[in-house]
Amino acid sequence: MRIDGDVIPDYPLSWQARALTGLMRGTLKPASALLMRHPLALTGVARAGELARLVRVPYPEHVSIVPAAFADCGGEWVRGGEGLDESRVLLYFHGGGYFSCSPRTHRSITWRLSVAARRPVLALDYRQGPVHRLADSLADALDAYECLLRRGHAPGDIIVAGDSAGGHLALATLLALRDRGRPLPAAAVCLSPWADLTDVPRRANRWQDPLLPASRVRWLARRWTDGLDPRDPLVSPVLGDFTGLPPLMIVTGSTEVLRDEGRRVAEAARRAGVPVRYEEWRRMPHVFPILADVLPEARLAFRHMAGFLAAVGAGPAVRDDEAAA
């Protein structure tokens, strides 16, 4: 697989994708537009998320999940089967706009990443708003990474990954580690990263996105950057200097409102000499790999991720017929 370059996977759009995007457009997008209008709504969703932790989310029998604890937060170890390389690890940050979701909600991603990378995944349950700030989330991410180093994992045996707000956290973590002179992981994978929290209107795909209302993303960015400099690279990683960072893989959908942020990250990283594989999947919704239980394109995306990790020496070899070149 080619590490550095832009790719538009040429797969026919599945009927499942057509049905799901239509359903999202008629239900989830209007619901998001209504909910994300008042701070009380964020508090309500966050509290509902706490209750959701009591619900057992099903996963395949071959998957092992074990709770993990850190200084100020928790998480879970996810193993997608037996025979994994326990000397290696993937540190994963879930999405959810920095106010919702948890490792539990993203298990359809984390166990498949464990299979793709042939290593355990540490899914971090980092602190989120509205109670906590972006700095708290970043502190948890850095603490988890340092914990992995203290456990004996070499930096080159660690991969960092995340989706949406978790993609933001993955990029901010890389920049913070570099700025502090800390050893960097082998690679990073960002799914639909939310990388620009400046007060900028998002016009691209404003109407095409089947899930996220552009105006509500802007409103949420204002909430989380209140009292901060939104142009700080740790707040808006897309504005950062990516010099010295490890190879990146960025996966987006062509019709999502955050697509251009992924593109801009890829362009900025390449200008700094970082190899970037940018994949833009036709008509896929925001963080579509989370739908792998029902969406064929999402399952194919994990084969692409496995190919990228193998190409950068951070995963098992993948046959040419298993990943796009």
Image (tube, rainbow, N blue to C red):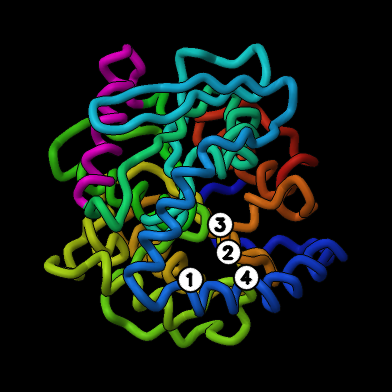
Q: CA distance from mark 1 to mark 4?
A: 17 Å
The residue identified by callout 3 is: 251
The residue identified by callout 2 is: 286
Q: Residue at x 68, y 70 (%)?
A: 24
Q: CA distance from mark 3 to mark 2?
A: 10 Å
* Residue nearest the observer in this picture, 296 or 303: 296
* Residue nearest the observer in this picture, 218 or 89: 218
Q: Amino acid at mark 4?
A: Leu
For marks 1 and 3 on the same chain, the one whose residue lies earlier in the sequence: 3
Q: Amino acid at mark 2?
A: His
| Res. 258 mark | 1
Q: Amino acid at mark 3?
A: Val
Magenta residues (range): 135-155
Residue 149, percent across and down? 29, 20
Residue 272, percent across and down? 29, 57
For marks 3 and 2 on the same chain, the one whose residue lies earlier in the sequence: 3
**Residue 144: within the magenta?**
yes
Q: Amino acid at mark 1?
A: Leu
| Res. 315 mark | none
Q: CA distance from mark 4 to mark 3?
A: 22 Å
- Sort mark 3 into few (<14), some (14-19) or many (20+) by Cα contacts within 10 Å: many
Element on which disc 4 rests: helix
